[in-house]
Amino acid sequence: MKNVLITGGAGFIGANFVHYLRETYPGVSIFVLDNLTYAGNMANLRSLEGTDRFNFIRGDITDRDFVNDLFSKKSFDTVVHFAAESHVDRSILGPGAFINTNILGTFALLEAARATWDGNYSGKRFLHVSTDEVYGSLGAEGLFTEETAYAPNSPYAASKAASDHLVRAYFHTYGLPCVTTNCSNNYGPYQFPEKLIPLIIINGLLGKPLPIYGDGMNIRDWLYVEDHCSAITTVLEKGRLGETYNIGGKNEWTNIDIVNLVCDIVDEFVEGSEEYSKLYPLAGGRRGLITYVKDRPGHDRRYAIDSAKIEAELGWEPAESFETGIRKTVKWYLENRSWWEEIQSGAYRDYYEEQYGERLS
Ligand code: NAD
Ligand code: TYD
């Protein structure tokens, strides 16, 4: 790896990956391509701006001329493709952007890589970051393996499934050096506050209702974001081309159990600090804020990943325990109030305008 293109590098997992790569592979040149949708935030990359071997390019992955031009000018040897519309609820309200970015954007990147690398695939790698949601929903038993048939249920999952199929086809048809990872639900720093865990932490701090969809018994398999990042570098280094690798934390939780746990950890941090007690006063504890709301349409019941393949074949395993990871995450949101306040107020746009002279919409 010398010149690495990271699409969606200003989003949650992408930004964590950029920081992880900078620490673990300091000699690599990083090129972040991101068009800064509502979910992209340059504040996530603030500490890297102006440093050597870090380049930010604002652009849309669906703009084929722009993407082709970028590939022809920079000698990328590695592409790590995170850019996507990523929130299931938004895909239910408006699937169009998901079809556009997730399918057509992936197509544009594959075409640019194919044209630029032009059959010279030695030392090249295109890693497509995908989700376990492509497999649909599990019953009470069983795990998703790489052999599980695709059965996406939400427009988000369907758009990711389509992009996975395109990546597969480019490997089989053109020999493009692709590999795909399908990961379970991530949590950790920089996660946009519309997703379950940051939403619960922030609403809990502010004393706002904590919405639980349906009966709260849906199950997700949670992985600390840095473990996802280490899995991705492992697959970049050692993954077999044309393969897919499932990544998960063997860490299944019902939504209600996870919300209760987050409430208790937030209570503990707040009650243990004079400063936080003054900032976030609440009588009776955060569990009292839990509010059951109407279920998400087509809400998948259970996700659970079998990550035996990446563990046995590539020697990856998660380093973070859930107990430590979730505490680190709550602490991060407590210590980075300005980060989420800037998102809530829209002030992160002012920062971008000051730095780059352009107003984000
Ligand atoms: P995110 O929504 O936080 O970030 C997405 C980023 O992509 C943002 O910075 C956004 O500005 C950028 N982007 C969106 N459309 C773009 C476009 N047209 N051109 C350029 N940039 C664009 O998402 P995330 O949670 O960090 O997820 C990243 C990837 O990982 C996605 O592909 C997602 O499907 C996959 N994934 C996420 C999870 C999870 O739990 N969050 C789990 C498994 C896989
Ligand atoms: P989410 O973080 O949106 O991830 P995904 O839908 O990709 O799994 O949601 C995680 C789980 O939490 C999912 O079962 C839906 C549920 N959920 C709620 O109960 N309330 C909420 O406010 C949100 C955002 C999610």
Image (cartoon, rainbow, N blue to C red):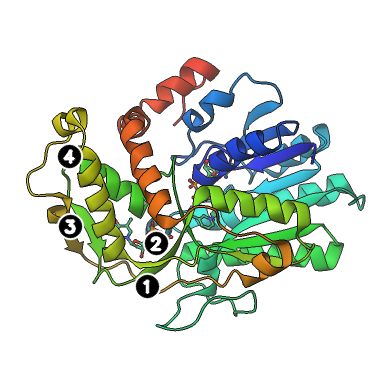
User: What is the spatial separation of the Cα atoms under label 2 and label 1, in whole angstroms?
Assistant: 9 Å
Give the x, y percent position of residue 307: 59, 69
**Residue sitting at x 48%, y 72%:** 304
Mark 2 secondary-structure assignment: helix
Discs 4, 1 touching: Cβ within 8 Å:
no
**Residue sitting at x 70%, y 31%:** 26
Q: Quadrant of residue 222?
A: bottom left
Q: Is mark 4 within 8 Å of ligand 2?
A: no
Q: Which residue is mark 2?
A: 92
**Residue sitting at x 52%, y 25%:** 46
Q: Nearer the viewer, mark 3 or mark 1?
A: 3
Q: Is residue 61 left or right of residue 186?
A: right
Q: Is residue 243 left or right of residue 162?
A: right
Discs 4, 3 touching: Cβ within 8 Å:
no
Q: Which residue is at the front of the view, 312 or 333?
A: 312
User: What is the spatial separation of the Cα atoms under label 2 and label 3, in whole angstroms?
Assistant: 24 Å
Q: Nearer the viewer, mark 4 or mark 1?
A: 4
Q: Which residue is mark 3?
A: 290
Q: Which mark is residue 298?
A: 1
User: What is the spatial separation of the Cα atoms under label 4 and label 1, in whole angstroms?
Assistant: 39 Å
First in sequence: mark 4 vs mark 2: 2
Give the x, y percent position of residue 71: 78, 39
Disc 2 residue type (three-letter): Ile
Q: Nearer the viewer, mark 4 or mark 3?
A: 4
- Residue 9 lies, with reference to residue 91, above or below; the image says above
- Residue 355 in view (yes/no): yes
Q: Which residue is mark 4?
A: 271
Q: Residues within 10 Å of mark 4 (few under 14, many from 20)?
A: some
